[in-house]
Image (tube, rainbow, N blue to C red):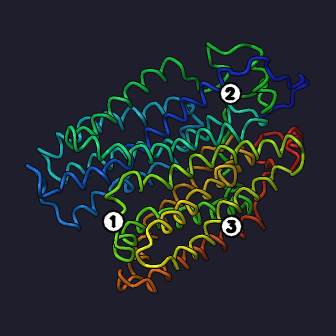
Amino acid sequence: MEVKSDVPIKKPNSLLGIRHLQALMLFLALLLAFAMRVNISMAIVAMTDKDTEDAFDWSIQTQSVILSSFFWGYIVLQVPGGEMAAKFGGMILITLCVGINSAVSLILPIGAYYGGWQLVCACRVVQGLSQGFIFPSIHHLIGKWVPLEEKSRLGTLIYAGAQLGTAIQLMISGFLADYWGWPSIFYANGVVGVIWTVAYIFLGAATPSSSKMISAEERMYIESSLGHVGGANKKLSTPWKSIFTSLSFISLIIAHCGQNWGFWTLMTEIPSYMKQVLGVDIKANGVMSALPYLAMYLLSFPLGFLSDYVLKKNWLSVTASRKLSNSLGHYGPAIALIGLSYVPAGNVAIAVAVLTVVVGLNAGHYTGYLLVHIDMAPNFAGTMMGITNAIANVISIIAPLVAGVLLNDETDAQEWRKVFYLSSAIYIVCNTFFVVFGSSKRQKWNEVDESKDGEKNKN
């Protein structure tokens, strides 16, 4: 429950505080989670390399099953994860997420040797299941730890960890496999994950009020900004009917689905496009593969600071600012995708440059619809994120399958234009729905007794 406080919101004098430490730990959690999510895509190339000893004789179909098995588990615990975050707090769940993923990474190489592809799939399903907690938990923790005035930049810092983790994993996996063999990819992830887990047990906290390290001044600043003074720990019943009948929330589902369609179409299909149309296998070069995700990571910071600056200066309302950011993150890639479909055959430099723009501009969604979950109903942000992420990740599975249906000839640039045009259209339609119906206005059902403190959001 949120209650209005008469205590003035005073920012602590210190430049860095415990809230920044929490943001850093959550950033690292996402970095590690996404590194362990994508490591198999690089490792499986070395695992099935027939020029090496003890290579696994797995067909393309078997490899596809292994690559998709993570998402079988990932979708399952999205909504329960949000509910559990609200009930038990985000800290315990995110600790379990990274801890379980790390342990599985350490045993996966042994499982591959003794249990074959079936046990590898089982390991990936377990990792997917535990990662079902991560976004609902992080959304819940941001809602408890990040003041309104810093939400865009700290939220961006945290979520950008996903893209940096993807980029780093793509860049280092090839080197690890060459020097120490493919198992080192999983061992490196597992060891670093264990270190993070131990550190977070001592440094993390579910709320400012439960932290033993935070100063009274900083705690009051955070709780006053979020309207949590005196009521932060009250457990509320989830208003399921109100959530699912809210047009603003439905617009978040639509926006999230549009984001996942475009992003995962690129993630899964671009390597084939590069090889079949442009004559280059982008996965053969880890640095080239990582460039778009590095661009997305780097661009997320100026966008986050700009969003907070716009709100600080009262140039735009919270709702308008979120819609502007999301439009950049969706309309921008939509236009660039059309440009990508007309890149001349063999011109890899231009193709990679356009692809980098497409993925880089996508960073706008960090300060767009993602934060609207917390703006609308911070008490149920984890549950709401679990719902939208579960539905959107079904799209993550469907989008590549649709691309496969559209591509009768992978070497024909005209065929690929169908895929890019469809993704572009979905970006545009989904974001337009969000622009028309989305809102950052604090919802009445966020609280047991409606509070007017949400008016300070300047919606």
- Using residue 103 as the reference point, say whether residue 332 is left or right of it: right
Of 283 and 95, nearer the camera is 283
Return the disc, 3 or 2, that comes first in the chain's sequence.
Answer: 2
Q: Residue 171: horizontal and vertical position, in percent?
A: 38, 46
Q: Is residue 45 left or right of residue 102?
A: left
Name the disc covering residue 233, or none: 2
Report the number of discs. Answer: 3
Which is nearer the N-term, disc 1 or disc 2?
Answer: 2
Q: Which is in the foreground here, disc 3 or disc 1?
A: 1
What is the C-alpha distance between the residues marked 3 and 2? Answer: 35 Å
Disc 1 target residue: 281
Say which amino acid is labelled 3.
Answer: Asn
Q: How would you rate the neighbour count of disc 3 (Cα within 10 Å): few for under 14, some for 14-19, many for 20 or more?
A: many
Front residue (pair 74, 323): 323
Type of the residue with mark 1 = Asp
Using the rendered view, name the quadrant where residue 179 is placed. top left
Residue drawn 34% across the image and 34% down it: 102
Describe the element under mark 2 as helix, strand or loop.
loop
For label 2, count other residues whose C-alpha is less than 10 Å away and answer few (under 14), some (14-19) or many (20+): some
Secondary structure of the residue carrying numbered label 3? helix
The quadrant holding residue 253 is: bottom right
The circle on residue 152 is none
Q: Is residue 180 left or right of residue 42?
A: left
